[in-house]
Image (cartoon, rainbow, N blue to C red):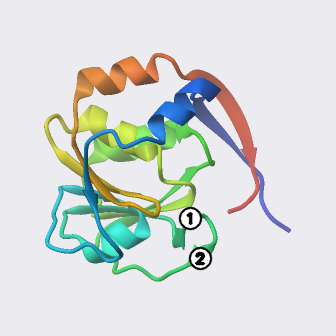
Amino acid sequence: MKSKFIVPVLKPESYLRKILSTPQGILYIGKYPIKDLEAHILVGDIVSNTLRGNIKIIDYKTRRHINIKPIINEPLTNLVNPRGTMSLMSRTIAKAKNYRTIIVKGEEDLVTLAYALENEETSIAYGQPDIGVVIIKSNRLKALRILKTFKPDIVVYNKV
């Protein structure tokens, strides 16, 4: 029997999800794997396996289906972050700043915002499906403007 977790989250409005799915930084176009790029924070399993960086945020999936085994750096922690949300737990882990690998149960995409709030002017890399890799410089003010549009919610999560 699976345990149920009540997870406090912030959810973007539907119009914002479409905007956030477009590249938010410099897009490096290329076929997998794109190498010779680096960023402080790497989001996604393929990006974490192929680029150089200090912090990896992974979920053992690519495009929500294909299971892959990324290279893991210690120390690591687990994070529950339901799909299409930013859990408050992600904010806490980003603030702690002492983990090199974060294994996400759910989806890692919006966890990027939690790290952007805590790491001003830090490079963050994430995959742009079927196109390449995006690298952005974190900007606390921009992240706050985006998060102000999110709505608080509670998600009952039973996939842990």
Q: Position of residue 79 (x, y in %)?
A: 50, 55
Above-or-below relation of 12 to 52: above
Q: Which residue is mark 2?
A: 66
Q: Could you tell me which residue is drawn at 53 percent across and 27 percent down?
A: 16
Task: Identify the disc placed on residue 3.
Answer: none
Q: Which residue is mark 1?
A: 63
- Considering the numbered disc 2 on the image, is that residue within a helix, a strand or a loop? strand
Q: Residues within 10 Å of mark 1 (few under 14, many from 20)?
A: few
Q: Could you tell me which residue is drawn at 57 percent across and 79 percent down?
A: 67
The number of numbered discs placed on residues in the rendered structure image is: 2
Q: Could you tell me which residue is drawn at 16 percent across and 44 percent down?
A: 122
Q: Could you tell me which residue is drawn at 44 percent across and 23 percent down?
A: 147
Q: Amino acid at mark 2?
A: Ile
Whether label 1 touches label 2, CB < 8 Å:
yes
Q: Position of residue 98 (x, y in %)?
A: 25, 55
- Considering the numbered disc 1 on the image, is that residue within a helix, a strand or a loop? loop
The answer to whether residue 34 is seen in the rendering is: yes
Along the viewing direction, whichever of 33 and 159 lies nearer the viewer: 33
Above-or-below relation of 127 to 120: below
Q: Amino acid at mark 1?
A: Arg
